Image: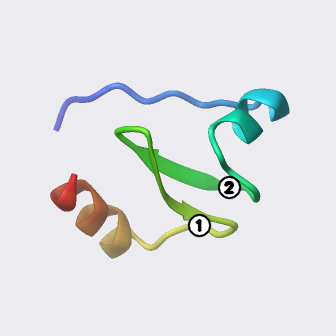
Amino acid sequence: MEDDFDLISDIGEILTLGVMSTPALMINGKVVTSGRIPTVAEVKEAISQA
């Protein structure tokens, strides 16, 4: 799979995106998980649903 990834570390931008706890995973502008590291299966499922 070939795709682009962004690492956002600016707290202002993180809050603007609606993330209240980190780490967070967003796919296509939607917060998929936040406050924990998702499992590989969860990431695969989130990608397949996107």
Say how many tags the image has: 2
Q: Which residue is depicted at the point 75% across and 31% down?
A: 9
Mark drawn on residue 23: 2
Q: Which residue is depicted at the point 34% across and 39% down?
A: 28
The CA span between labels 1 and 2 is 7 Å
Amino acid on which the number 1 mark rests in the picture: Ile
Amino acid on which the number 2 mark rests in the picture: Pro
Please state the horizontal and vertical placement of residue 20, each as a whole percent of the image. Answer: 75, 56
The mark that comes first in sequence, 1 or 2, is 2
Q: Is residue 43 left or right of residue 33?
A: left
Please state the horizontal and vertical placement of residue 14, each as a whole percent of the image. Answer: 72, 37
Q: How is the image coloured?
A: rainbow
Q: Is residue 50 left or right of residue 8?
A: left
Q: Which residue is depicted at the point 16% across and 59% down?
A: 48
- The image quadrant where one finds the N terminus is top left
| Residue named by callout 1 | 37
Instruction: Count neighbours of disc 2 (C-alpha within 10 A) and say few if under 14, some if 14 to 19, many if 20 or more.
Output: few
Residue 10 in sight from this viewpoint: no
Label 2 sits on a secondary structure element that is loop
Label 1 sits on a secondary structure element that is loop
Q: Which residue is depicted at the point 82% across and 29% down?
A: 12
Q: Are marks 1 and 2 in contact (CB under 8 Å)?
A: yes
